[in-house]
Amino acid sequence: MSMQRLTELEGHDEFLARHIGPSAAQQTEMALAVGYSSVDALIDATVPASIRLKNPMALDGPQREVDVITRLKAMADKNRICKNFIGMGYYGTHTPAVIQRNVLENPGWYTAYTPYQAEISQGRLEALLSYQQVIMDLTGMELANASMLDEASAAAEAMTLLQRVNKKNKSMRFIVDSDCHPQTLAVLKTRAQPLGIDIVYGDATELLDAGDAFGLFLQYPGSSGEIVDPSALIEQAHAKNTLVVVASDLLALLLLKSPGELGADVVVGNSQRFGVPMGYGGPHAAFFATRDAYKRSTPGRIIGVSVDRDGRPALRMAMQTREQHIRREKATSNICTAQALLAVMAAFYAMYHGPEGLRRIAERTHLLTSLLATELTKAGLKICNKRFFDTLTIEPGDQRDAILTRATAREVNLRCDHSETLAVSLDETSTRADLQLLVEVITGKAPAALEDITADSPIPAELGREIDYLQHPLFNEYHSETEMLRYMRRLESKDIALNRSMIALGSCTMKLNATTEMLPVTWASFGAMHPFAPAQQAQGYRELLDDLERMLTECTGYDAISLQPNAGSQGEYAGLLVIKRYHESRGDTARDICLIPSSAHGTNPASAVLAGMRVVIVECDAQGNVDIADLRAKATQHSDHLAAIMVTYPSTHGVFEEGIVEVCDIVHEHGGQVYVDGANLNALVGLAAPGKFGADVSHLNLHKTFCIPHGGGGPGMGPIGVGSHLQPFLPSHPVTPVPGLSPDNDVVAATPYGSASILPISWAYIALMGAQGLTQASKVAIVSANYIAHRLRDHYPVLYTGRSGTVAHECIIDIRPIKEASGIGEEDIAKRLMDFGFHAPTMSFPVSGTLMIEPTESESIAEIDRFCDALITIRDEIREVESQRLPLDDNPLVNAPHTLHDLTAEQWPHPYTRRQAAFAMDSLQQDKYWPPVSRIDNVYGDRNLFCACPSIDSFRESIEDEPSLG
Ligand SMILES: *Cc1c(COP(=O)(O)O)cnc(C)c1O
């Protein structure tokens, strides 16, 4: 047999053909269906020539998966993982293997979307509710949300919440006690400045005596490790109508009286040490707990208990319309994507260990610290903090250099950010050997053998705590691995994630999160790095970050990137601050107007408010484009005050606006800067670049376009790209300054590179695709959306199209006329899609009464067709209602979703068949998803807000009461 040539046999294992769903022939087929002779003809008709890139991006060619892993391994190997005792909010922890493999590494969990569609999200909602329960129990507060981005930004949110709710004290001062982490102080200062809040930093007791303040921030235990009973200070503060935020530590709270019991108004912190790797800064879930009275002002998402149509308890996101960013310029927080996946992990960690197991971890950590204190004291060292949990601050005097030299030689990281002191923090992973090592490093002498000794706890009796937490059965029933494994599987299988079917959520870009991209996330060489480890230990990260920045400048056309913002919302905020600093640097201090088109995502106006700007809305015309005449008028009217415009491109209406260059020019003429919201970059990469068509700054949602999975509501990353004139104002960091930037710059996240450990995902995606693959992905995303618009057009009106009658990478179908004619609305369609095993498209954004569909390039034509078939079948059902063959109050739509329970009930009282209810399409016979609950009553849940884990009895009762069980 004759063989082919080597070159012919190579090149067939390229990743891009796996990432992109349709084959080349199918792409052409879709373009032909839409009426174009080729993919390129459709793209030429859709993307305005005025913004098209002339040259391909300067990126390496597509690489094979095995080669990309080899390259990542080489980078990871340049990281040196030393023994970490730095603490400062980040600690070693053992991720239980059963959680690592079955949650963190499991697409059933990590590819899910934010649980807006509650019926298909019961699994992750239950896990998040458990997280809230952990936080409420340990903080002693009445209410907790389901995760924040990091501890420092949670502290900033607490500060602004207290300012809003404090009606009795209108001072603009906020006291920050000096024993707090430096990164928290830095983020508080950045957040306070544009809002006119005056941060006063120092000894809280003295500052409280010295003047009025609306709020006070304390850390318990303090950054130095010292534990001070805060109750007297809190009482004194309350007497002066000053409200109090306490930042705390979950492991310490297993032994320490809760801040809630001591009088705190808000408690914040990080759940990282509950089984989530440090990851050079993230991602991990911060927490936010407060009084019930402040629930309506609380930022972030709160999971609540409601009931479904049959009266069964069912979970949902409480007060969804209260989600802050939805309130646009009236919002008080811009947080949208948070850290859901990591909150889920922390909750499972608490279940895995249970209250006694967690207590043992805390006691052991505390005992090792006490033993260390004894040894160091014996050796004559001065320990500054008398009462500690896991952290000792040492005054080494003239021994400092010698200690640090020994530490470096033994690969031990101590906290050394203060010139006078050193500090050491122990954690779950600390061992007897570590104790020996620390004594040797710090005293220079080997300790006597550590026998099975004990020590007296320095925690005073009045701050001690018994096990009064985590008594719910959830934290006591899954201690065998078998039970834990099955519980997590049960929850997972209640939900729809990308490993089940297409999730066509407009604006959210739910594309493939390839396994190869995900592999590095759980390598210890990335995961075990402390965010404040010395730079020379993190050279692998440095190479990765630098290379990713270079890649992202190519993809966006900007000159510089900041990788600090850990969500799109935070990128918006950071980008607007950069604009503000730029204007200020030119003496242009009066510029505070931010123009925002009415079609904008709610985070845009919310971020503008946080950056201290005034929002002026620009109208859209009948075609959904920014109304240029209105823009011109408003830019002229506010010319002296114009700071910026924030526009999304292609627009949230799903069209490439022809006028974008003119929009940029008008704003620049009036001295403003152009912020392009990069959430829709999936339609642009390789075709056009915001940095080239006139924009000054953009954020990129790496969890949309660049393949970081959504994690059921986070993590994400929202780095920003800027033109060279804005580069000097990018965020830096007080502990680890970003190279090339002043450490005094603004700080928007607790760590310099946000959630650094998920950046290998985006790096891998770009390396795998190369310039050609990325460009092809953008084209196919556009072709697929047009194919869907074409297939649905005869059944559902497509709301907006561009000049050639095409859409961008998403299309909006208008349900308003259908509702008018039939009484069936977008919500009924969304719920009915669940019976077909699909997650609904984006509902009522950016136009209420519509559905916005975004297929992405990753969906095969077969899946796209299945999805269109489902929508068309549903349209036929609506016609039955329209023609009154089915009554409006009893049809497959209003009764959707249908549970197995409904189907198997003795009685079937409906005027359509069981088969139509559950198997309306033949393909469902092969793979049927059963929604675990029927339609959830949102109003009931908001009226009866309940955000803790319900008793198991309430579930049992509801099942026993079930009338239709016969
Ligand atoms: C997703 C999105 C955002 C917000 O980004 P997060 O990462 O969720 O904070 C902002 N604007 C648009 C248009 C979006 O689609």
Image: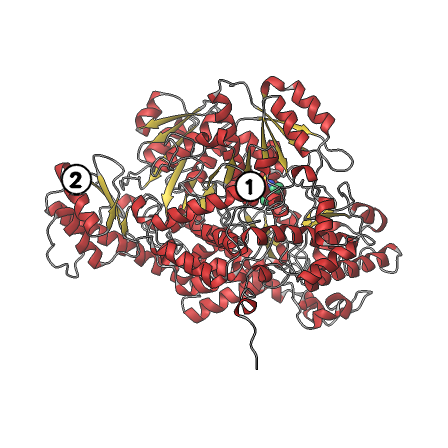
Residue to which mark 1 is pinned: 556
Q: Which residue is mark 2?
A: 400
Q: Identify the element where label 2 is drawn.
A: helix
Quick one: 287 or 395, which is closer to the camera?
395
Q: What's the residue type where badge 2 is placed? A: Arg
Front-most of residues 582 and 439:
582
Amino acid type, residue under disc 1 in the picture: Thr
Q: Is residue 1 visible?
A: yes
Residue 859's place in the image compared with 599, above or below, is below
Figure quarter occupied by ligand 1:
top right
Mark 1 crowd level (few <14, some 14–19, many ≥20, 10 Å Cα): many
Q: Nearer the viewer, residue 815 or 174?
A: 815
Which residue is drawn at the image coordinates 52% and 46% (left, top)?
58
How far from the left and from the top, in percent, is residue 516?
49, 61
The quadrant in which the N terminus is found is bottom right
Q: Is residue 816 left or right of residue 228?
A: right
Q: Secondary structure at mark 1?
A: helix
Above or below: residue 664 compared with residue 758: above
Identify the image quadrant of the C terminus: bottom right
- Front tag of 1 and 2: 1
Is 241 in front, or is 533?
A: 533
Q: Position of residue 558 (x, y in %)?
A: 53, 37
Q: Is mark 2 within 8 Å of ligand 1?
A: no
